Amino acid sequence: MDFKPRIRTTETPQGQKLAVVPLEGRFDAKAASDARQLLQQVLDFGYPNLLIDMSGVTFMDSSGLGVLISALRKCRAAGGNLSLCSVPESVALVLNLTSMEKVLTCFSDLQTGIANFSPAPSAR
């Protein structure tokens, strides 16, 4: 996974801080530790709302999924939320096979994700 992220900050539609974190490359066991550290740093900087741009991810396994679920829990514990956008078909397949598409909100693209991001978990 490429960790030269171009993290962007903006606001949710409700006016709360939102960090847009782009991930690239393989999101597997080898990249999981770095990704976990990156997301923790963003949280530590006071951004409990994370929108993960998955457009550059070419592969994701259970290790990558574990990082996302762990980050989701941490965001919610901090009063925020985590959503995904621009999810490639191969990653969407992993989310569907594990039923995580029911837990992680996914938006079709970055602009839609920012415009519709909800800091509170959506009721399902």
Image (cartoon, helix red, strand yellow):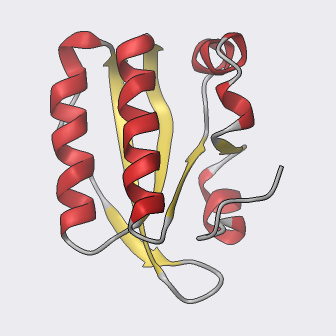
Q: Picture coordinates of residue 119 (x, y %)?
A: 59, 70
Residue 9 lies left or right of residue 115; in this view the side is left
Identify the image quadrant of residue 2.
top left
From the image, which quarter does the N terminus lie in?
top left
Q: Is residue 102 visible?
A: yes
Identify the image quadrant of residue 70.
top left
Q: Picture coordinates of residue 59 (x, y %)?
A: 44, 12
Query: In the rendered image of this protein, does residue 10 appear above or below residue 2?
Result: below
Foreground of the two, 114 or 32: 32
Residue at position x 33%, y 70% in the image: 47
Residue at position x 63%, y 86% in the image: 14
Q: Is residue 4 visible?
A: no
Q: Residue furthest right?
A: 124
Residue 95 lies left or right of residue 31; in this view the side is right
Q: Picture coordinates of residue 114 (x, y %)?
A: 61, 66
Q: Residue furthest front?
A: 77
Count of marks overlaid on the render: 0
Residue at position x 67%, y 12% in the image: 93
Query: In the rendered image of this protein, does residue 109 appear above or below residue 76?
Result: above
Query: In the rendered image of this protein, does residue 85 appear above or below residue 57?
Result: below
Identify the image quadrant of residue 62.
top left
Residue at position x 35%, y 16% in the image: 63
